[in-house]
Image: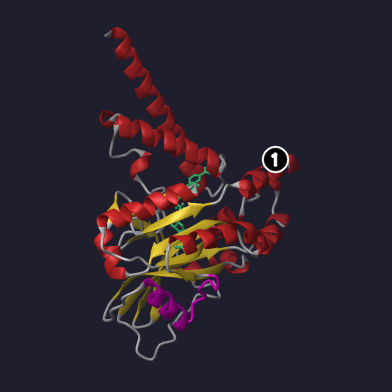
Amino acid sequence: ASSRASESEELAARVAELRRRIEEANYQYYVLDNPTLTDAEYDQLMQELRRIEEEHPELQTPDSPTQRVGAAPLPEVRQHRHPVPMLSLANARSEEELQAWHRRAQNILPNATFEYVCELKIDGLAMALTYEQGRLTVGATRGDGLVGEDWTPNVRTIRSIPQRLRDANPPPRVEVRGEIYMTIESFEKLNASLTREKLFANPRNAAAGSLRQKDPRITAERNLDFFGYQIGYIEGRNLSTHWEALQLIAEWGFPVNPHNRRARDLDEVLQYCREWEQKRFELPYEIDGVVIKINDLAQQQELGYVGREPRWAIAFKYPPIQVATRLLDIRINI
Ligand code: NAD
């Protein structure tokens, strides 16, 4: 019995250690925009913690990093409570995991035929834009998923984000979601102009750091860009597919990624994923994978969520070659 006691003590200590390291990495990544681990290292810690918590439910706690989307918002910045939570995405790291995701959805809706939308997973930060009577009123980050940070004045400096929707009869209220990102070219120019201590590790952190500036004039100089990828909610209009939502977003005047594609079955999804694994290095911005969404919004609703992740979407992640070498480059420069 005493050896079992010490075993469970060891496990509890490991859980505490993992949580401490993940919390620290979250703070560095989400709050300081200055990651100290590669994404692969981070994901490994998360995976181990998830596995232990699953096998030992007695070790689960509501404040565990596995239960949260990101970091809590900064206290000084105005907070924005999301009317519809901004959640995360489950990951697939192999084609088998993607197939397993498809089978789970098919098991829940055995008679359904799924159509998919494949989108490049732009490596930036998620943004929720509220438009009232067609005018931009709030631009907020995801934060912990329920409450984000209101950075509206800074968001207004991003040229590709419309201040007004191009719509003679706009919905009374709509939330357009998308990714704020920085091109590789702008990222390299920015780093060339910064002192060593202030260098950003990658375009994603440069985008987040440039948005979250006390002085919006600095944000304005940083060349941030935007792709719309979802409607969080819309009043007064009914949409039936995600593809339709993407078209509406484009009509309103937002950049929508031109490489988005519909797929009739999982084979076409896999083809898209394979194609972009090669071609991603030709893009002017970084992607870390492909997001696959079930197109039919009624099916999305039926599938719902498990924890903080929708069952109707998944991120197919590419191996993180680029991030690791970038961090290494910076270390070498120092
Ligand atoms: P995620 O980044 O894997 O996926 C969700 C995000 O994808 C969304 O919030 C959105 O911003 C983005 N996205 C891009 N294109 C999209 C599209 N077309 N449709 C929908 N969403 C799209 O998950 P997460 O919860 O945001 O972050 C967790 C990840 O962050 C980890 O897997 C890890 O790689 C990284 N991380 C790293 C560290 C570190 O120290 N290196 C720390 C914390 C988190």
Residue displayed at 51% across by 64% down: 180
288 w.r.t. 162: above or below:
above
Residue drawn at the location 42% of the way across and 68% of the way down:
264
Q: Is residue 75 visible?
A: no
Mark 1: C-beta under 8 Å from nearest atom of ligand 1: no
Q: Amino acid at mark 1?
A: Arg
Image colouring: secondary structure
- Residue at the image position 43 percent from the left and 48 percent from the top: 97
Density class for disc 1 (Cα within 10 Å; few <14, some 14-19, many ≥20) is few
| 61 magenta-colored | no
Q: Give residue 206's quadrant in the image.
A: bottom right
- Which residue is the extreme one toward the top? 2
Give the magenta part as a residue range: 242-259
Instruction: State the SS at label 1.
Output: helix
Image location (x, y in percent) of residue 250: 47, 79
Indicate the position of residue 325 as horizontal and vertical percent values.
67, 45
